[in-house]
Image (cartoon, grey):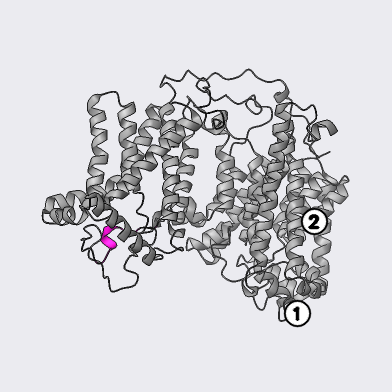
Amino acid sequence: MANAEHGGGPAAAFGAAADPATARLHAIRLALWLIAGILAIRQVAAVLTSPRGSRLTDLETWAGPNGVLHVKGSLYESTQFTGTPFGGLVLKPLTRAAEQALGWGWTFGTLLLVVALGLVAARALPEPIGRRTSLLAAPVAISLLMLSLPVRNTLWLGQTSVIPVLLVLLGCFVVRGQRSCGALIGLAAALQPAVLLFAPLLWFTGRRRAAVSTAVTFAVCTALAWAAMAHDSSVYWVHHMAGVGLGGRADGLANQSLHGALLRLGLTGPPETGLFLLLGAAVAVLGLRRAVRYARDGQLLLAVAITGCAAIAVSPTTWQHQLLWVLLAVVGRVGRRASDRYVWPVAVILVMTLPATMMLPHMAVLNPLRDNVVLLAALAAATAVPFLSRASEHYASPVPTQYAPPVPARFRRVPLLPFLRRVLSRPNLLLELLLIRVTYAAYQQVRLAATGGTTSGGRARAERHGDEILSIERFLHIDIEHAVNHAVVKIDWLRDFFDFYYESFHFVVPLTVLGVLYWRRPVDYRWARAALGFATLLALVGFWLYPLAPPRLMPALGVIDTVHGVQDFSQPDYGTLTALTNQYAAMPSLHFGWSLWCGVVIAVVAPRWWMKALGLLHPLFTVSAIVATGNHWVLDAVGGAVVVGAGFGLTYLLSGPRAAAVPAAPEREPAPELAARCPGPAAGLD
């Protein structure tokens, strides 16, 4: 079992004579355990407070009064039970107990299994491992498990998919004898046959007794099930060997296996089955070769994760609650530079915690990627991702990130944020694209949630706020929206220009500015990106607290919607113009806010005066367009200017002034660490 350091005696535990670094570490550890506890309570509460018919549906289907496990005939006649015959054999005697524990007992039991899984995974991290990592690994692992889609689905559906993963980890990292190890893994394989891939892993890493024990245990369990339920066993194994799958349509989006992906692509019949077997064999061979190599390198947890990811791909059916192996692959280290180390773990965490619709845009050409995003992550982990060997000089000592000289905090009680340190080197592009996409998806979700999850929700409140804004503008004599709108409508070329500007430049210009800064001015890129992020976050607060109808959606005002066309105000959902945008997120105006951000950034970093002037024209054209097209009030633009100013102010407050835009020095690779060149035997294999 991988060794983990434990630090702090009684004095350190209670803070006596402890240095500030140790005290901070223990405070962080306590906070992380608190977060893990809150997440666990939240997940359990979400399940137990839901209506009876919408929670633990799989468990009810199996063990309810008329559940599958009560059926005297075949388990698979109803197509609701997708486990192995051995799983049915084990669960049938527990049917009565399961009925009595359909709520609290089953949910809390699953929760304890998830906690145990996190503890074992945290203790299995490969050496060398620092004291900070060893102390913080367990609460972080449990928190990630609680947030992951497989665990949330397991708790929600009442599934048992955590058990095979936990049995494999117990066999690899906890039990001592090889026979006991093999027995646990064989039992897991009897519940999920794809787990048999761990038998070759054990064999080729020198644990042949464990491999034999795995095969024998699996055969005995399967034979027992065949003897007790011969018809069900025949149906199950023949059905799966034919590549059809059980439990409804095998090409459903929840089936994240190669078989499901091929069916979603339109392949059927013998050609699909043959291609699936061919690709599955290739993935199994490549995955096992990589797993054996990393196990011999002393990274057994990574080897287990790679083998599990290969099992996901080669299984005929792999439902969402069976995908925990991908999350375990987060322990692999990828990249020589310190700035590259975050790409793989961030990508894995995003894939395993967020719906695929938040990862990729709603574009038909991206549907194959979005529908198979978890499978693609599993395939990448099993066959392609270049995880570093412990013998690599960059494993423990990556090329360091270059930072500008530190500056003092602006105010004594407002410390500078460590993750906003002024970095001189260019960040990883893939990581930036991932964060931009997910941030924008979260931005869309918050805008929708502000009106109850629909674009037309909160109409009365939004119109009432619109009347308030109009009253303020009349008091200030700046209520020019109607006059400007009708004046522009009479001039066709001007109307077309403002419509085009409103629809096209809102995203193009900010993305262009970010792209140019990333490539030419990486120091200024981080500063500008932070300011834009803060401004957008503040704007979301405004959308949430103050939904506002724009002039074009105020029926009595008479403003013409030049962009979207004439609206039918007799319809109750007339404000629903798209399926993705909250039409009442008008205050503050991010159309103007983002354009002002572009103008300020260009004015600050551009080397020529004419470039600065051109950049400042963009917010001028934008404010004219949003008023002329009837999409915003004048005060919306004022609100956009306020949040942008606050964004730059918060960036200055929390990260210090903009770092000098000096060219970054060439990166120097660190001297090789002798300790990192001695991988030793695979931890936990002897």
Q: Which mark is residue 186?
A: 2
Q: Which image quarter is the N terminus in?
A: top right
Q: Residues within 10 Å of mark 2 (few under 14, many from 20)?
A: many
| Mark earlier in primary sequence (1, 2) | 1
In this view, the mark in front (1 or 2): 1
Tell me the element at label 2.
helix
- Region rendered in magenta: 547-556
Q: Residues within 10 Å of mark 1 (few under 14, many from 20)?
A: some
Q: Which mark is residue 70?
A: 1
Furthest-left residue in view?
Answer: 491
Residue in view at x 69 percent, y 30 percent:
390
* Residue 295 sits in quarter: top right
Where in the figure is residue 625, as x and y percent of width and height? 23, 48
Residue in view at x 59 percent, y 71 percent:
248
Where in the figure is residue 54, as x and y percent of width and height? 61, 71
Q: Name the amino acid type tagged 2.
A: Gly
Seen in the image, is 658 located left or right of residue 549? right
Asked whether residue 429 is drawn in magenta, I would say no
